[in-house]
Image (tube, rainbow, N blue to C red):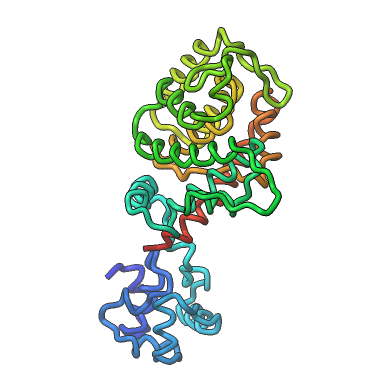
Amino acid sequence: MDLKLKKIYAPMSETAFYILFSLQVPNHGYGIGQEVKKMTQNEVASILNVSPATMSKYESNALEPSIESLKKLAEIFEISVDELIKNEESKFDISKINILGILREQKDMNLKGNLYHNTQITFAYNTNHIEGSQLTEDQTRYIYETNTLLTEKNTITNLDDILETTNHFKLVDYMLDVAEQELTEEMIKEFHKILKEGTSDSKKEWFVVGDYKKLPNEVGGLKTTSPKNVERDMKKLLEWYKSINEKTINDIIEFHANFEKIHPFQDGNGRIGRIIAFKECLKNNIVPFIILDKDKLFYYRGLNQYQTNTEKGYLIDTCLNAQDQYTEMIKYYIGTK
């Protein structure tokens, strides 16, 4: 027995000692009886002055111990209530979850109502809506689940909105297949080809699907790289990115900001940039993020400030907030299993 623990807890019965010890084990939560193999559920319930039925609810996390029980233990053992409590938040360790592996597995299972299924719908709806798609989230879900479009009477739906939604579903699948591979120009061009294939843009002579732009463009009133310099600037960006041995979320955000500043394609740059960021997060064991349409003004402002060297923190905070939102999605569908 640890000498420090023995000194503090010597006045207790052995049973009481193991109760407290189990409560302090990291990532333990309220599953007291499961950790203390030497005790029965009734013994734990007796110490806490609760019924065995209540104890069962503690163990299944259906009910939290009362503050009175926690205060009683804290007073007896001369420690704070905070030291006793290990709630569900502390049990959830996102770093131990193989997000890419789960998404791939669920993609192959072809089942509804899981992380992959809702990632597809959330990603397609928001990334396209940011760029002007008029499809609703319900319509996006209906297209994904039934391969049909649900419309209201006398409404007009842009065919490109439908095509780019279904194309984005294919793009996410392809991205998951190549997520662990090194990011290259060829891969980025393939992303663009998948997204824009079959759209009205693909039928325009001056629009190149799966290759860099022929005509100048701008984003948010800011000039972007001229067509003749796109290949040069993309190579420089990828070389810089490749030189980073251990990539962080900030490196991925910086790549994203610089990619959008180059704006290498005639159209679709935002969606390609965001799918690249998602892929690179998965590749580097970082929780990915999906920018939601409701946050697009913060996102655009962050990009503008980052690209003009005004302030980097705004875009970083927006992406980190989106990362927190995706973490909540993971917790909902994966939980602590």
Which residue is most to the front? 154
Is residue 36 placed above or below 266 in the rendered structure? below
Residue 284 visible in the displayed image: no
In front here: 187 or 41? Answer: 187
Please give the name of the residue rendered at 45% of the width and 25% of the height, measured from the top-left corner: 188
Report the quarter where the N terminus lies: bottom left
194 horizontally vs 313: left or right: left
Q: Is residue 26 left or right of residue 160?
A: left
Residue 81 location (% of width, % of height): 52, 73
Q: What residue sits 50% from the left and 32% below the top?
A: 195
Question: Which residue occupies the foreground of this view, 131 or 181?
Answer: 131
Q: Residue at x 58, y 45 (%)?
A: 125
Question: In the rendered view, would you say 173 is above or below 37?
Answer: above
- Residue 2 x, y percent position in the rendering: 30, 67
- How far across and how far down the image is residue 56, in percent? 39, 83
The one nearer the camera, 217 or 144, is: 144
| Residue 238: % across, % down | 45, 20
